[in-house]
Image: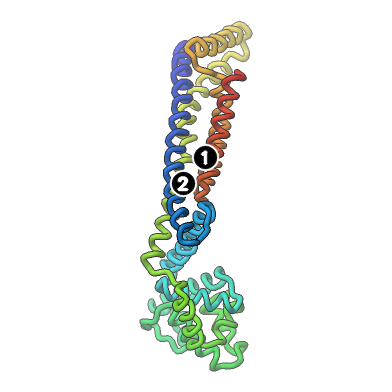
């Protein structure tokens, strides 16, 4: 591409970049303010009820609940158990100092072994048979866990069936032993405590929590994608420009000519009103700001989102004045 053509393209794209960054910031700020206002309205309602929650604290509660529901929803998909069953069993396991990770890993392993047994895998059939569970069982994963717990309690000495427990729960079985030793009846009884306290999310709420988190992820990714949409079109142009300059490095006369051409490009840009210093300075800061705003949005930190936007605008204004 000729230097003259590069000049025209660079002028147009830099001018467009400056406009697009401004538009993107305005749209993001507008949406953040709308979400902040919505949460503020809820916060005020709670305040009238004596809850005394700030907007930030309320947003944190929403995100915490959504994260918990999201985890349950994904575990439900991987184990086949209901959301209610999983929450109750998780509560029992927590009381017995088992981590959510160990319980999840153990249930996922158990579900896989049950599936293998149903498909006729002999090793899995034998593993489940040790706990009285047939290959064609209609038990859910949590119900199977409770039946295994009955066998562990009845045995009295878990070391005698440690190998069998390892076969169905994997390495997580050791941390699950205190829960298993309490037996199925106690597990169900303790799990029902959580339900009586109102601490069990419905399947619908669990699904909504997962969908909400997915939407936050989409919003964050869209903000991060702005740097590709805004800055990306400039890369091929600069590649051609640097190729044109690099091709003349062994010829001093041509290099001088290309250098003069490059000078002409930026003089032309200045003439048509594109603030070069502002644009190039702003590109890096805008990208960093967009990523920071995406992180703030993902955590429902609307005030932080707006503060970052204000800092970005202040930096942009300083870049304009300093250029």
Image quadrant where one finds the N terminus: top left
Q: Are marks 1 and 2 in contact (CB under 8 Å)?
A: yes
Task: Provide residue 215's location: percent of width, then percent of height.
Answer: 41, 51
Residue 116 visible in this rendered orientation of the protein: no
| Residue located at (54% from left, 93% from top) | 154
- In the rendered image, which residue does mark 2 sit on? 36
| Residue located at (37% from left, 83% from top) | 137
Residues packed near mark 1 inside 10 Å, few (<14), some (14 to 19) or many (20 plus): many
Compare residues 155 and 32 and report the one nearer the observer: 32
Compare residues 22 and 260 and report the one nearer the observer: 22
Task: Provide residue 31's location: percent of width, then percent of height.
Answer: 42, 41
**In the structure shown, which secondary structural element does the residue marked by tag 1 occupy?**
helix
Task: Provide residue 128's location: percent of width, then percent of height.
Answer: 46, 84
Residue 132 visible in this rendered orientation of the protein: yes
Task: Provide residue 74's location: percent of width, then percent of height.
Answer: 44, 64
- In the rendered image, which residue does mark 1 sit on? 306
Vertical order, 99 against 320 (above or below): below
């Amino acid at each position: 591409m000729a230097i003259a053509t590069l000049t025209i393209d660079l002028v147009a794209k830099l001018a467009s970049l400056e406009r697009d960054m401004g538009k993107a910031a305005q749209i993001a700020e507008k949406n953040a303010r709308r979400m902040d206002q919505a949460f503020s309205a809820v916060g005020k309602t709670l305040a009238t009820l004596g809850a005394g929650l700030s907007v930030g604290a309320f947003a944190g509660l929403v995100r915490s609940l959504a994260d918990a529901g999201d985890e349950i929803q994904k575990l439900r998909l991987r184990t086949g158990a209901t959301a209610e069953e999983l929450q109750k069993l998780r509560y029992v396991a927590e009381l017995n100092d088992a981590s959510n990770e160990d319980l999840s890993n153990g249930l996922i392993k158990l579900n896989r072994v049950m599936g293998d047994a149903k498909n006729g895998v002999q090793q899995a059939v034998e593993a489940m048979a040790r706990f009285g569970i047939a290959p064609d069982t209609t038990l859910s994963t949590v119900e199977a866990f409770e039946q295994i717990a009955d066998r562990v309690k009845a045995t009295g000495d878990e070391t005698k069936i440690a190998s069998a427990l390892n076969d169905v729960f994997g390495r997580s079985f050791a941390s699950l032993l205190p829960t298993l030793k309490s037996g199925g009846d106690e597990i169900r009884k303790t799990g029902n405590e959580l339900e009586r306290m109102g601490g069990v999310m419905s399947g619908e709420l669990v699904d909504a929590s997962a969908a909400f988190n997915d939407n936050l992820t989409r919003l964050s990714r869209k903000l991060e994608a702005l740097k590709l949409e805004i800055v990306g079109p400039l890369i091929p142009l600069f590649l051609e420009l640097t190729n044109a300059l690099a091709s003349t490095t062994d010829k001093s006369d041509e290099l001088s000519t290309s250098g003069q051409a490059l000078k002409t490009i930026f003089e032309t840009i200045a003439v048509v009103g594109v603030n070069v210093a502002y644009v190039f300075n702003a590109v890096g800061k805008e990208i960093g700001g967009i990523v920071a705003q995406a992180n703030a949005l993902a955590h429902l930190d609307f005030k932080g989102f707006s503060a970052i936007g204000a800092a970005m605008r202040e930096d942009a204004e300083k870049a304009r004045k300093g250029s």
